Amino acid sequence: MADGHATRRRTRRTPKPLDRVRLNDLALHYVARFATSSGKLETYLRRKLRERGWEGEGEPDVAGLVERFGEKGYVDDEAYARMKASGLLARGYGARRVEEKLRADGLEEDLRQANAPGEWAARSAVLAYAKRRRFGPFAALVAGEGTEESHKRREKQLAAILRAGHSFDHARRVVEIADIGELEEWVEEARD
């Protein structure tokens, strides 16, 4: 028995192929909605061109459009790199993860190097990560220190800190220090 009021399946409308105006509008909408780098904007626009096609005159000038957006200040790679690096460091990620993220976002080598964290920032980030994940001295006291179970727990913590992008020396320091005050002193030693 068919119900005449049942919802019908909607047919999906295929989007129109892009031309110069639609491509510009798409780019404007993207930069208005998201903080982005020029590399991410270019990747986004090229993906949209692959999905929707091109019906404009000649070839689409994606690189020129991205450059114009940079000149107008809609896309600022330096500000984006600072924002992204400081956000990752505040969440406790290490220098390697910061560099990987900036590279994935299409930022040039000089911007990635300029936003690489110094020693104090790297130590502060590993401290923030240890607090957030309750590693090292922030872990709840577990009975049986010195047992194989505590050794496995420290190895897992060490591996997690390394995956977060921190150096082995910093990860080992966090896992081995038993006192929170001593760990905070170690971070402050690196302050310039």
Image: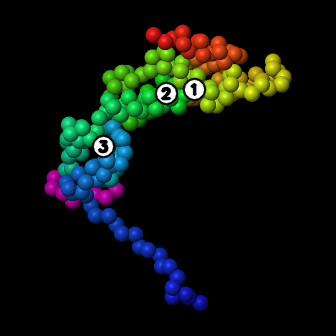
Label placed on residue 128: 1
Q: Secondary structure at mark 3?
A: helix
Q: Is residue 182 visible?
A: yes
**Pointer 3 and pointer 1: residues touching (CB < 8 Å)?**
no
Instruction: Decide whether residue 170 is among the magenta residues.
Output: no
Decide: is 88 above or below 175. Answer: below
Decide: is 80 above or below 60. Answer: above
Q: Residue at x 40, y 32 (%)?
A: 83
Label placed on residue 89: 2
Q: Secondary structure at mark 2?
A: helix
Q: Residue at x 32, y 23 (%)?
A: 110
Label placed on residue 86: none
Q: Residue at x 61, y 31 (%)?
A: 132
Q: Quadrant of residue 187?
A: top right
The C terminus, quarter of image: top left
Kind of residue indicated by mark 1: Ala
Q: Residue 172's spot in the image, x, y percent?
A: 63, 17
- How packed mark 1 is, by other alpha carbons closer than 10 Å (few <14, some 14-19, many 20 or more), is some
**Residue range (magenta):** 50-58
Q: Residue 182's spot in the image, x, y percent?
A: 65, 13
The N terminus, quarter of image: bottom right
Question: Could you tell which of marks 3 and 1 lies nearer the N-terminus?
Answer: 3
Kind of residue indicated by mark 3: Glu
Position of residue 185 in the picture relative to residue 144 (left or right): left
Instruction: Decide whether residue 52 is among the magenta residues.
Output: yes
Q: In terms of secondary structure, what is the magenta stretch mainly?
A: loop
